[in-house]
Amino acid sequence: MTIQTIIEPFRIKTVEPLRMTTRGEREQILAKAGHNLFNVRAEDVLIDLLTDSGTSAMSARQWAGLIDGDESYAGARSFYRFEKAVKDLTGLKHIIPTHQGRAAEKILFTILGGPGKIIPNNTHFDTTRANIEVSGAEAADLPVKEALIPSLVKDFKGNMDIAGLERLLKQKGPEQVPLVMMTVTNNSCAGQPVSMGCIRRVSELCHSYGIPFFIDACRFAENAWFVKTREPGCRGRSVTQLAQEMFSYADGCIMSGKKDGLVNIGGFLAVNDDELARKARNILIVTEGFPTYGGLAGRDLEAFAQGLEEVVDEDYLRYRIRSIEYVVEKLDAAGVPVFKPAGGHAIYLDATSFLPHVPPHEFPGHALACALYIEGGIRSCEIGSVMFGKNDPRTGAFQPALLELVRLAIPRRVYTQSHMDYVVECVGEVFAKRDAIRGVRIIQEPPVLRHFTATFQPL
Ligand code: F0G
């Protein structure tokens, strides 16, 4: 018999203790936090699956890079190492570091957004959408129809609806559409990958209208792994080659290094257009820092460059993607409604099917996330009507999100298989008791990105 277990391709050198709490303590903690898991202290969480962003464990080489970082204000060696790593990967001309992804978004949409503009994406992430809307532009989501059916097993559910994009471009043209974006993997659609074919066709379509094509590249390596393992004709090519091909179709990209950069902070904007780069650097100097550090310390740039090299390691990606699939398989076997097939960085529970008795305006995803915390100290994140639902500005009518999901995002290189087995058991336990879970109502909320700070009350 051949050996089948895919192991973590690293061993652990430094450990952080986890603090156990009782159910009674967790009930009190959650009530004090206004029933919002963003308000809970991390030390009161046992398994923290709130996000895969900025939560990676760095390698010994990355930590060594922190000591080796060049902290010169201008022209630091660490910047040139970083710039080379990003150029080798993306082939793009101007590499502009930022302190994280949304800072790159802010700069890009300050220049290209504005009233009357519309910016399509397969699905915008919340900060991308917020930065577009803050500029006065409209953010348009164009997911494929299959993305809205959680139980449907199909490859590349993260793709963009190309026919829908073509209709939009025909109608609005380059006067109103300053760029088209593609998010890989599609975070707001359950971390589903985008195929190379789709990236290529969207790029060609954009260029036929003279519109620049940008990639939101936070999870480019995970996307490239899916392309390698699922797209016909790609198995024989390396993840690096596939990622390079993906970027070759783009005129620019933004990236939060807090995901596939394997760092705790960092991001960048990369573009080919000289004029756009000049404008971006001018804003950067005012808001982030000098163009060779852009809001980061030299040591951060060093760790980021190293992370970009490590993340394309195929033993790492095989383990990474398998670790998510492992949890999805176990939950699915237990009858728990889970988004299928497994995505790249997270497990997404389908709260609509999990809690059919809780209607969208009572926020089933939020209620489920709270129940998981009470049950096992697991912190997850609602990606549903708290995050994306709206009240119609004219009628006040509630408009729910397209899907009510709960995301269990898996930090990179942090948790082991037994942590995941514990998560599976806790979700199973909550599923067994699902009939007793009630919805929530919002007590107070801010005008934008309400999921971060709103407070709730169980019904
Ligand atoms: N784009 C995507 C697809 C993202 O997932 C994120 C962040 C950003 C942009 C913004 O990057 O956080 O560095 O400013 N996503 C995190 C998450 C927060 O939990 O999914 P950032």
Image (spheres, rainbow, N blue to C red):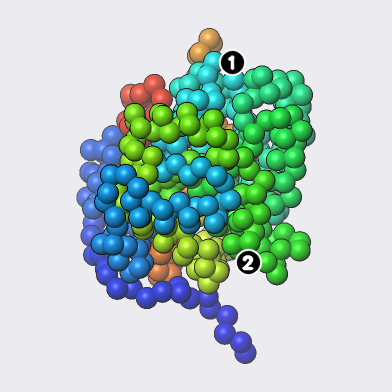
Taking the spot 33% from the left edge, 73% from the top edge, the residue there is 12
Which residue is the site of mark 1? 116
Q: Amino acid at mark 1?
A: Gly
| Ligand 1 lies under 8 Å from the Cβ of mark 1 | no
Give the secondary structure at mark 1.
loop
Does the CB distance between marks 1 and 2 fall below 8 Å? no
Toward the bottom, the furthest residue is: 1
Q: Position of residue 443 (x, y in %)?
A: 33, 25
Q: Position of residue 40 (x, y in %)?
A: 27, 43
Left or right of residue 360, residue 293 in this image: left
Query: Quick one: 73 or 57, which is closer to the camera?
Result: 73
Q: Quadrant of residue 160?
A: top right
Taking the spot 45% from the left edge, 37% from the top edge, the residue there is 104
Q: Earlier in the sequence, mark 1 or mark 2?
A: 1
Which residue is the site of mark 2? 238
Q: Position of residue 53 (x, y in %)?
A: 41, 49
Query: Quick one: 164 or 306, which is closer to the camera?
Result: 306
Q: Position of residue 307 (x, y in %)?
A: 42, 60
Q: Amino acid at mark 2?
A: Ser
From mark 1 to mark 2, how far is it between C-alphas?
42 Å
* On screen, residue 58 above or below 458: below
| Ligand 1 lies under 8 Å from the Cβ of mark 2 | no
Toward the top, the furthest residue is: 394
Taking the spot 53% from the left edge, 9% from the top edge, the residue there is 394
Q: Is residue 241 visible?
A: yes
Residue 275 is tagged as none
Query: Quick one: 358 or 286, which is closer to the camera?
Result: 286
Give the secondary structure at mark 2.
loop
